[in-house]
């Protein structure tokens, strides 16, 4: 009998327990998922958990930060390129979608993607094929797409910066990662976990005085 990996999401608050249960439910699907939440709330951990608890766990998990790749390189990063397609393309290169074949691709900060690339991504989601830069034919890909953003995409649509049709293609299975200030019950659990994780070998992990722990639970944790 196959055993599922333990979830990466640490905490005992109602919000965290609900998130873990939602991940467990949605991981069985290969439908596209959209993870929303503030920066620092663990959106990539949620994406990894969706992958590891699902039927594609044996395949690759390939992340890419759409906001960190220069605009003129993002198409090649996602879809690959063929030798000679542009200056510096000295050999064929597989894109992230092909590298994720049989597994999951995680498109982080999808809200930072340019409108022209949004059109091309929409086609990939519809056709399940990619067109490498300089290639003469499309390549079929079998991937689960999980996207994430800290932006309010509905507001971005209103402002004309995000395509409505792409939003609905991505938002098939929605998840939201709560901010740490919304789950203060998790603070002691997280502190205990990281104190143990970062303790030097053979050393006893640090502990926290009750009044200090209380102060940390009352803190707003900007940036999470």
Image: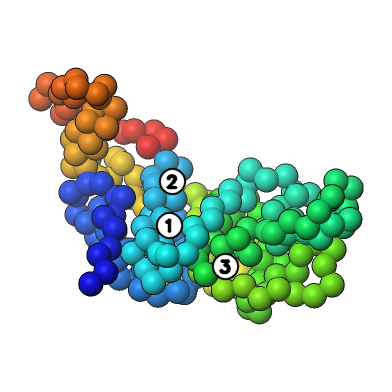
User: Residue at (39%, 72%) from the top-left corner?
Assistant: 55
Left or right: where does residue 219 sit relative to residue 103? Answer: left
- Residue 124, given in percent of the width and then of the height, sits at 66, 72
- Residue 213, given in percent of the width and then of the height, sits at 17, 27
Instruction: Provide the residue designation for mark 3.
Output: 101
Instruction: Provide the residue designation for mark 1.
Output: 47
* Circle nearer the N terminus (3, 1): 1
Looking at the image, can residue 57 be seen? yes
Q: In this view, does 184 lie above or below 214?
A: below
* Circle nearer the N terminus (2, 1): 2
User: Residue at (21%, 42%) from the top-left corner?
Assistant: 186
Left or right: where does residue 168 sit relative to residue 83? Answer: left
User: Residue at (36%, 57%) from the top-left corner?
Assistant: 49
Q: Badges 2 and 3: C-beta atoms under 8 Å apart? A: no
Q: Distance between the residues labelled 2 and 1?
A: 15 Å
Q: Badges 3 and 1: C-beta atoms under 8 Å apart? A: no
Query: Residue 141 lies in what quarter of the image?
Result: bottom right
The quadrant of the rendering that contains the C terminus is: top left
Instruction: Provide the residue designation for mark 2.
Output: 38
Q: What element carries label 1?
A: helix
Q: Which of label 3 and label 1 is nearer to you?
A: 3
> Tag 3: Cα neighbours inside 10 Å, few (<14), some, or many (≥20)?
some
Farthest-out residue, left: 210
The quadrant of the rendering that contains the N terminus is: bottom left
């Amino acid at each position: 009998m196959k055993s599922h990996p333990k979830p990466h999401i640490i905490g005992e608050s109602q919000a965290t327990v609900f998130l873990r249960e939602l991940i467990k439910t949605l991981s069985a699907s290969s439908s596209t998922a959209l993870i929303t939440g503030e920066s620092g709330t663990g959106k990539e951990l949620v994406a990894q958990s969706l992958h590891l608890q699902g039927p594609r766990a044996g395949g690759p998990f390939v992340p890419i930060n759409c906001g960190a790749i220069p605009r003129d390189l993002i198409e090649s990063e996602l879809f690959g390129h063929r030798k000679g397609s542009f200056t510096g393309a000295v050999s064929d290169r597989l894109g992230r979608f092909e590298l994720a074949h049989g597994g999951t691709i995680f498109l982080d900060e999808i809200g930072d993607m340019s409108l022209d690339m949004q059109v091309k991504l929409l086609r990939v989601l519809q056709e399940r094929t990619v067109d490498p830069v300089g290639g003469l034919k499309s390549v079929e890909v079998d991937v689960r797409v999980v996207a994430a953003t800290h932006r309010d995409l509905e507001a971005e649509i209103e402002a004309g910066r995000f395509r409505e049709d792409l939003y609905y293609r991505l938002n098939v299975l929605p998840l939201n990662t709560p901010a740490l200030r919304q789950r203060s019950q998790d603070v002691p659990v997280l502190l205990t976990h990281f104190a143990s994780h970062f303790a030097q070998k053979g050393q006893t992990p640090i502990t926290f005085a009750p009044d200090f722990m209380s102060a940390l639970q009352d803190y707003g944790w900007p940036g999470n």
